[in-house]
Image (cartoon, rainbow, N blue to C red):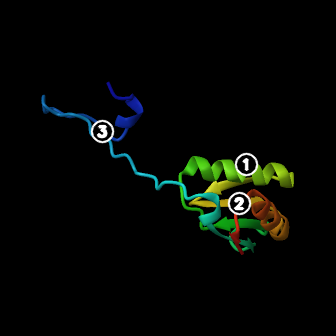
Amino acid sequence: MSDWKDRLGVVFSTNPDFSYETYDTDEPETLPVGEQKLRVSIEKQGRGGKVVTVVRGFVGRNDDLKALSKMLKTKCGVGGSVKDGEALVQGSLRDKVIALLKAEGYSNTK
């Protein structure tokens, strides 16, 4: 039996043979740490005047990106989030984030 949350978009069907189909989006396998090509930049545009450090280019599962983001936020002592495949860290911490990523083994970081 499927979870009821998978069927939230379906209102009603009169077809007795109807079966609910769910579409799982396949997440790519997470690349090894040494093969990741991450780009770290600082942005202010469209963020209400707040400065954020953005980590782009992560290839892998969303849970792994969230774990990376949590590690960066914890070691920098700031907040942040994961949005649209990017890890956002509050503040202008580009050099510190690059140093942390290199210490974790992400060698292709710019």
What label does residue 88 carry, if any?
Answer: 2
Residue type, mark 1 in image:
Lys
Looking at this view, is 8 or 90 the one in front? 90
Residue at point 38%, 36% (across, down): 6
Q: Earlier in the sequence, mark 2 or mark 3?
A: 3
Q: Is residue 61 left or right of residue 37?
A: left
> How far apart, in angstroms, are the residues tagged by discs 1 and 3?
35 Å
Q: Earlier in the sequence, mark 1 or mark 3?
A: 3
Q: Secondary structure at mark 3?
A: loop
Which of the 4 image quadrants contains residue 34? bottom right
Give the labeled residue for mark 1: 70
Q: Is residue 41 above or below residue 79?
A: below
Give the labeled residue for mark 3: 10
Residue at point 75%, 57% (across, down): 104
Residue at point 76%, 65% (across, down): 52
Q: Quadrant of the N terminus?
A: top left
Nearer to us of marks 2 and 1 is 1
Q: Secondary structure at mark 1?
A: helix
> Furthest residue to the left?
16
Q: Is residue 79 left or right of residue 54?
A: right
Q: Is residue 66 left or right of residue 91?
A: left
